[in-house]
Amino acid sequence: MALVVFNTLTQKKEPFVPLNPPKVGMYVCGVTVYDLCHIGHARAGVVFDVISRYLRFSGYDVTYVRNITDIDDKIIQRANERGVSWDGLAATFTDALHDDMGKLGMADPDIEPKATDHIVEMLAMIGTLVEKGHAYESGGSVWFAVKSFAPYGVLSKRELDDLMAGARVDVNEAKHDPLDFVLWKGSKPGEPSWESPWGPGRPGWHIECSAMGKKYLGEIFDIHGGGKDLVFPHHENEIAQSHACSGVAPVRYWLHNGFVTVNEEKMSKSLGNFFTIRDLMANHDPEALRFFLLGAHYRSPMDFADRYLVESYKSVARFYDLFAAIDTMDESSAGDDAGMVDAFTRAMDDDFNTATAVALLNGELRRLNTLRFDLPKMKKKPDQYRMGLESLLAGTATVRRLGGVLGLFTRKAADFVAEAKAKKLVEAGLSADELDGMLVARTAARGRKDFTTSDRIRDELAAKGILLQDGPAGTDWSVSFE
RNA sequence: GGCGCCGUGGCCAAGCGGUAAGGCAGAGGACUGCAAAUCCUUUAUCCCCGGUUCAAAUCCGGGCGGCGCCUCCA
């Protein structure tokens, strides 16, 4: 089976056929850097990160472009509020963006263009649109004449009349038509501005993506992604600009991810009900957030709650526990579990069904854990043991590799465990030595069958989120986040 | 008002015409001094009502309920 993707343009799943295989050009709308990123940004980031990873896994040569909007009204406004320069503010939040996305295990996009580095390209495009009669200057700004572009509405399935009827369209004296949107915004004194044939100003929001997409991926490219809320007006306007300029539809497949909601309500900056990635990372492992985000299909809405992250952490930890155990075996296998790879591919080929892919990984984890604990019993039968070991090693390697396609399990297992433990000790206010002392005391108590004492120590630690596990090799501990 | 999405076990969530994946929580069991971890077993007929079909959670029609876009927004 081959890859099938849901195209917003047609509202259907379609076979994915790139323009110039094996090359795939993919453009994703990044963020406007005027504030910290929230979970919604994290979802969009993770979704398209996984899509790019999977396309590569499938053998495509992907060029992944994700832009940064570093000039915009909100940036100017926020900078004024804080009494800092607009570009300084943008730089600050760009750094924060990189930091946060990096923590979430995002592979860097191949190209990360900034709006302010592409004023020339935007002006050229606006010039062409004016020449072709799709845009006009008025009141120091340049506007796109929506009615000059017949296909307007193809993406968001809107009729011009319906839009007109909506009372919310912006009324602006300078526009010839209420539907028109700005390409070049004439600036007032004191505002950041660039020179243009129409006077000083700054770019409108939509034109940057048209200009940068074209520059880095060409007039027609394969995938354009972003959050569902960008379908209208942003992507609709982007199509209008690009298509009117070049004469061809710019994008073959439009992909949009669903929202993250909180209490069933969309999380957004304007509602103020958002959690920043940083807030969350203070108490949770970034991989838990990624795992959570992958648990639902990318187009479905997801409700967020803290406890889901706790659940996800447990799941992730279960995988690392297996990996850590295998790592200490000092054996390796070049083998691969072909059936597993096949099932995974089928799931992901169906419009990137990460939920099914994760379920597959879970099922395999159970199989491998069973094998892991049964293996010692097989030692008397060398043939059986050898086969079991091979299956365990190959299966584990496969889970790791496929997890990697989802951006999961990329840390060393030992590091994952060590990190979680170190963090928990700090939280519990214990030093490693103090904990060791307690464990030694408890082992001694158990040795003399003083279970009252040993259980008291165990309860004390459990109250701090430190869970003890007694095994043949001694007592180990793990971390709870409840 | 216009456009679109969704409604699956206590919770989260796949499946989208062939008889309900997976996770969390719960119950029972193996293991354990007791636990924990791990493993095994176990919990649904898919919002309601009609229709199409040999066959529907899956398609169509009508309800009810929730959400999103139409204004900045991933």
Image (cartoon, rainbow, N blue to C red):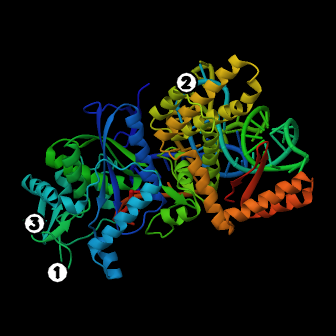
Question: In this rendering, does residue A141 appear at all?
Answer: yes
Earlier sequence position, callout 3 versus callout 1: 1
Q: In which quarter of the image is residue A88?
A: bottom left
Q: Pointer 3: what residue?
A: A196
Residue type, numbered disc 1: Pro
Secondary structure found at label 1 = loop
Q: Where is residue A189 in the image (x, y as percent from the top left)?
A: 17, 80
Circle 1 residue: A189
In this image, B19 relative to A219: left or right? right
Q: Distance between the residues labelled 2 and 3?
A: 59 Å
User: For the point 34% across and 47% down, which residue is it?
Assistant: A157
Between label 2 and label 3, give the one nearer the viewer. 2
Sequence order check: which comes first, mark 2 or mark 3?
3
Label 3 vs label 1: CA separation? Answer: 15 Å
Q: Which residue is drawn at 58% across and 56% down?
A: A419
Query: Is the residue under label 3 in contact with that under label 2 (CB below 8 Å)?
Result: no
**Horizontal and vertical percent for residue A344?**
52, 31
Q: Mark 2 points at which residue?
A: A339
Cα–Cα span, label 1 and label 2: 65 Å
- Residue A329 against residue A76 in the figure, above or below: above
- Kindly identify the residue that appears in the image at 60 percent across and 34 percent down: A330
User: Residue A208 versus residue A158: which sits nearer the camera?
Assistant: A208
Say what amino acid the circle numbered 2 marks.
Answer: Gly
Asked whether, in this view, residue A34 is left or right of residue A192, the answer is right
Q: Which of marks 1 and 2 is nearer the N terminus?
A: 1
> What SS does tag 3 mark?
loop
| Residue A276 visible in the picture | no
Q: Do the residues labelled 1 and 2 touch (CB within 8 Å)?
A: no
